[in-house]
Structures are given as C-alpha cells and as structure tokens.
C-alpha cells in the first residue's frame, strides 16, 4: 500500500459502519463505489504483500477494456470492495441477531479476511486463464483459481510471518472454497471441516462465496463495479437485501416481498454476461490471446506456475507485454497474434445461433472440427482456420431457477422459512433460465464466406433448419 494509506482508489456510507475495532487505529482508502473503506490491522498485513499487490496488475474484466475502454478496474479494488461488504454484512447480522447467533469478533474478522483474499489466486485475463487456456494446454484438466487462493494464503502467512490464528485461516479457506464446483471436490476434507467447525454457524459461509444459492457479496460488488466501469446502468440495489436479510435455521434468508429484487440480481448478472463478458468482439480477442498463450507456453512454461504459489504470484496480465516485446524466435507466432490485436486485425465473427430450448439438455460443445467437416464445395477449410465459442449464459444454476434454492420469511415476527415455487410468482418472469449460444469465427478475413457457409451447413445437418437469426452480411464476406 505504501506510506500514503489514504489512496484515492464514493456511494455506500454504511460500509464498515460500527466496526469491531477503533477507527483511529485503522487506515482507510477511498473507493469509487463504497466510499471510505476502513482497513483493520490484520487485513493490512495481507494487503501489504507483493502477492496481494499483484491483484493491481489483473484487470477485473480481463480483455473487455479492448471494447469497453473504461473497464480497466482491477482485482485489487474488487477485493477491497468484497472485504468492505463482507464486513458490512456480518456486522448487520451481529447488530440485529448477534446475541441469538453467537456472532463474535473472531467470526467478524474471519468473514472480512475471506472477502479480502477470495480472489488472491486469480489468474490473468479474468476467467480466460482457468477456463480456456489451461484446459487446452493440459488436455481437459480442470483447475480453479480458488485452489490457488488457498495455497497462496498459506504461502503469504509463512513467507511474511503473519501472526494469525490457524483456526481463522482454516475457516477463511473453507469460505473461499465454498462455491467452487471445481476446487471443492479436490479439497473434500474441507466439507467435513465445515460441518464440524461451523456446525452452528453455517450461515457464515453464505456471505462471501455462497455455494448454497449464489447470493453473496462477491456478486454485489462486481455487478455494481462492472456496470459502472462499462457505462451501463444498474438498478439492482444490494443495500436493500443486506438490510433485510435474516438468519433462520442456520441459513441467510430473505423477505418474501424481496423476491423480485433477488431476481433482478441474477438478471443483471446475466445481462452483463451477454453485453460485456461475452461480447462477440471481446470473445474474438480472447480467442486470439488463448492461441498466443498456447503457442508461447512450451517456451515460457506458463502453465507450470499453477503447481507452485511462490512462482504463480509472479504471473499477471503483463504476460502479453512480455510476449509482445521479446525478440525470441520461439515467440514469433504468439507475437504476431498480439500485433494483430493491437492493429485490430481480429478473428472475424461470422455468425451465431441460440441452441433451441428442447436441445439444451443433450447439447455437446460445437468444435472447429464440426464446422470444417460440414463444408461442401469451394475453399478447403482446415480446422485451424476456424474458432468456435460456446457461450453459456444462465442465472447461476444452469437450466434451473436459482430462486428455488433460496429460502424466504414472511415478516420479522415469523420464525418459519419457506421457498417460493414458480407458479406462485409473477408470470412475467422467464420460464427458461439458460441460453447456449454457438459463435463461429474465421481466423483469416478472406475465409469468412467459406466458414459462414460451412456453419450454415452444420446447422442444417444438426437441426434441419438454419437456427441463426439472419445470414452473414455480404459486406463481411467480401472483406479481405
């Protein structure tokens, strides 16, 4: 953080209100979303490490700034924001229900540290590193940044001799792993630990990364922060949910009258996926960066860093600049791809279609080989001429309604929690909760027409009709 703690990293005057420590002994930063964020002594010990400061070099939205120029905020400020909201959430529960729930200073500190460190193991370029690059370079191997987060926490504690209770660190790691479908099975002993160590306070694991129903302060922060950075409106109000939430049966529940507010949370997130995170040009650039990393991997050994936290923390978005400026012949192909991105000579988007609802259940990802094998006459396409992007957009629970996993209460006099079935709510809400969009790109401008035709042939072969909304524009086919 450096000598001057009052960084000018404002909106939520309640953030970290009524803290369990003396503000005169804390430091604070100014955040453009939450206003003043007060940093306690223990959290500062983690923040003031090179491993945590690395988050400044990871753009929160990866390569989206190539399309949305304002999207240059980092994982660093997002992590401070989640720390802030985690502290606010646990403090509100302590204020309203602390005596009955047994919330103590240890619980408050643990939840805040979990919020602070939940993304410390994140890879470069948002989720591209773990979801696109690693599976291709490691033949389908699944790895999640939460795995590295828990390893890096241990590394930071050991490397910097941070004096912190081992029980707190154990629970922090449990909270970070709580919502990871990839990491948690590999650390299945944490499931047992959670049941043992937090048997009477399972609700604490609903705050930072909620694997139970997806409502957590991580989403609260990034939805508002990302919307603002991209110049998009955001009508979702997380303050309302945080002010009215209540613990019943060891689970955070919400007022039944807030049902539509919760739906707006999931709908806003889906809108961000559609308009920003999976924007067709953002995905084109991501496909090119993945190809560049794959071609550079054997020389730079990028993927090997996931085995060692002492090496992994050195990896950030600057890997692109390393490739771009290195004179090594081994990096020539990767360097040429980065140069194409700089000069806006991108992979050309040809067309897309939404998978019909009745085909979603048995859908298999479409591959470049599928498209290449669908060509009939004309230019001979090779698999390497084509890039395919299978975009899944949902409300966090795949084809299921996420609100089915949320429990509600009638009013503050009621002690009963209940779920709300689909047929008891507004009929204006969607009856389908997932979109699967198949996009095809031509890696060479002169092949757009051929790739587009092969893509149409593929749709006819699979569905009997062209599922795309319209034909690829002729001017795009003629672009060379």
Image (spheres, rainbow, N blue to C red):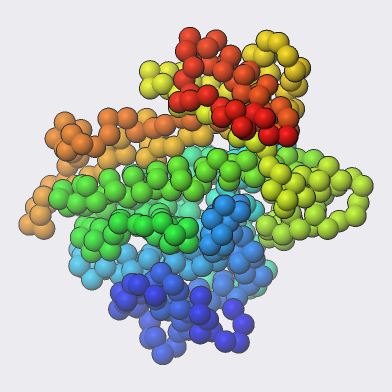
| Total number of numbered discs in the rendering | 0
Q: In this rendered view, identify the residue nearer to me: 440 or 32.
A: 440
Q: Quadrant of residue 105?
A: bottom left
Name the residue furthest left: 413
User: Could you tell me which residue is drawn at 16 percent across and 48 percent down?
Assistant: 256
Q: Give the quarter of the figure containing the N terminus.
A: bottom right
The reply to whether residue 188 is visible in this rendering is: no
The reply to whether residue 479 is visible in this rendering is: yes
Name the residue furthest bottom: 24
Q: Quadrant of residue 473?
A: top right
In this view, 14 is above or below 382: below
User: Could you tell me which residue is drawn at 37 percent across and 30 percent down?
Assistant: 399
Report x, y in % for residue 258: 19, 51
User: Could you tell me which residue is drawn at 52 percent across and 71 percent down?
Assistant: 164
Report x, y in % for residue 119: 54, 57
Q: In this rendered view, identify the residue nearer to me: 30 or 308.
A: 30
Q: Quadrant of residue 435?
A: top left
User: Could you tell me which residue is drawn at 39 percent across and 60 percent down?
Assistant: 224
Q: Is residue 16 left or right of residue 44?
A: left
Q: In this rendered view, identify the residue nearer to me: 355 or 444.
A: 444
């Amino acid at each position: 953080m450096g000598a001057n703690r009052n960084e000018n990293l404002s909106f939520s005057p309640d953030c970290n209100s009524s803290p369990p420590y003396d503000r005169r002994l804390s430091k604070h930063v100014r955040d453009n979303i939450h206003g003043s964020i007060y940093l306690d002594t223990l959290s500062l010990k983690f923040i003031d490490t090179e491993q945590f400061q690395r988050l400044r070099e990871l753009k929160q939205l990866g390569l989206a700034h190539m399309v949305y120029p304002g999207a240059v905020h980092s994982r660093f400020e997002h992590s401070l924001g989640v720390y802030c909201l985690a502290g606010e959430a646990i403090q509100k529960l302590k204020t309203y229900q602390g005596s009955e729930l047994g919330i103590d200073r240890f619980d408050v500190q643990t939840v805040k540290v979990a919020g602070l460190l939940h993304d410390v193991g994140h890879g470069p370029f948002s989720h591209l590193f773990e979801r696109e690059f690693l599976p291709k370079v490691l033949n389908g191997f699944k790895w999640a940044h939460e795995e590295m987060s828990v390893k890096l926490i241990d590394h930071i504690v050991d490397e910097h001799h941070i004096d912190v209770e081992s029980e707190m660190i154990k629970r922090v790691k449990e909270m970070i792993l709580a919502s990871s479908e990839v990491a948690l099975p590999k650390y299945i002993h944490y499931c047992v630990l959670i049941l043992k160590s937090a048997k009477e306070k399972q609700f604490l694991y609903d705050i930072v990364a909620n694997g139970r129903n997806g409502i957590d302060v991580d989403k609260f922060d990034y939805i508002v922060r990302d919307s603002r950075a991209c110049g998009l409106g955001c009508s979702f109000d997380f303050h309302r949910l945080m002010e009215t939430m209540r613990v019943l049966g060891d689970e955070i529940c919400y007022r039944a009258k807030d049902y539509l507010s919760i739906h707006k949370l999931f709908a806003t997130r889906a809108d961000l996926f559609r308009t920003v995170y999976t924007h067709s040009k953002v995905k084109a650039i991501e496909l090119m960066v993945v190809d560049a990393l794959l071609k550079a991997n054997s020389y730079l050994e990028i993927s090997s860093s996931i085995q060692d936290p002492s090496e992994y923390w050195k990896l950030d978005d600057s890997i692109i600049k390393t490739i771009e400026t290195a004179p090594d012949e081994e990096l020539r192909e990767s360097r040429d791809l980065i140069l194409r991105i700089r000069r806006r000579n991108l992979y050309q988007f040809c067309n897309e279609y939404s998978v019909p609802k009745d085909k979603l259940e048995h859908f298999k990802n479409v591959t470049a080989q599928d498209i290449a094998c669908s060509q009939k006459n004309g230019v001979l396409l090779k698999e390497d001429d084509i890039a395919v992007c299978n975009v899944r957009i949902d409300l966090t629970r795949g084809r299921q309604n996420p609100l089915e996993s949320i429990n509600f209460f009638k009013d503050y006099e009621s002690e009963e929690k209940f779920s709300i079935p689909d047929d008891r709510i507004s009929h204006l809400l969607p009856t389908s909760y997932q979109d699967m969009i198949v996009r095809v790109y031509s890696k060479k401008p002169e092949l757009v027409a051929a790739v587009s035709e092969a893509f149409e042939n593929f749709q006819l072969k699979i569905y009997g009709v062209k599922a795309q909304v319209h034909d690829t524009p002729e001017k795009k086919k003629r672009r060379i």
